[in-house]
Image: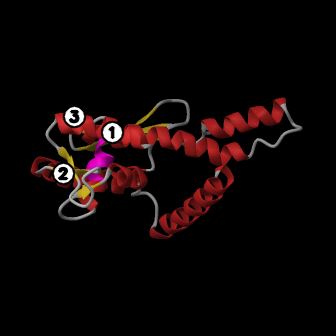
Amino acid sequence: MSRDDGDGSRRKFIFHGRHIIFREIYSARVDRVTEIVHQWRRERPDVDPSPLLVIGRIQHLAEILDAALRPPFAAAGLGNGEFDVLAALRREGEPFQLTPGQLSERMLVTTGAVTKRVDRLITRGLVTRSISEADARGRVVGLTPAGVDLVNDLIEKHLANETALLRDLTAGDRTDLERLLAALTRTVESSVA
């Protein structure tokens, strides 16, 4: 279903399960990032605001993607990052266990963030924390059967949601975007390291 808002843009509402995904399709209207760049060029012609066309869009897209991808996790009662813990453990295969340090590495977050997420998931009965068989001083986090069931269900919904979000890109567009984002990630990571 779509609607013309009278300002040259059209809004499209996509029904995905119980959730409505809102998508704005730009036609005559200039997108907000381009508008910001034009304003900076007018106000400060001595600086080049063109990086905003990439970085600004990536930041804006990250916010939109978070809003579009969160509903299945929120419906399951999971907070930010908790699905990442479950998914990291599930991807390891049986016995679905990792140390907190390994979880930290795989999720690209601090061990403190891992501890908070794991504590919440223990309370929900989705993971356990136990003494490592390899090192009695260490701990391992493992999925419970309920955790395995939940992550198996949610990964299907999550990937279907991501597929729907990418549906307007051709296979070539996706390949190009993957390559460009990987290159940008390497560049940014090396510049902040």
Identify whether 176 is placed above or below 119.
below
Mark 3 to mark 1 CA distance (whole Å): 18 Å
Q: Which of 22 and 152 is in front in this view?
A: 152
The answer to whether residue 12 shows anywhere in this view is no
Cβ atoms at labels 1 and 2 below 8 Å apart: no
Residue 58 image offset from top left, x and y in percent:
56, 46
Q: How crowded is mark 2: few (under 14 residues within 10 Å), some or many (20 or more)?
A: many
View extreme (front): residue: 136
Residue 107 image offset from top left, x and y in percent:
40, 51
Quadrant showing the N terminus: top left
Mark toward the viewer: 3 or 2: 2
View extreme (left): residue: 145
Residue 175 image offset from top left, x and y in percent:
50, 68
Q: Residues within 10 Å of mark 3 (few under 14, many from 20)?
A: few
Cβ atoms at labels 3 and 2 below 8 Å apart: no
Q: Residue under circle 1?
A: 115
Q: Residue under circle 2?
A: 143
The three-letter code of the residue at mark 3 reads Gly
Identify whether 11 is placed above or below 85.
above
Specify which label sits upstream in the sequence, 3 or 2.
3
Q: Residue under circle 3?
A: 77
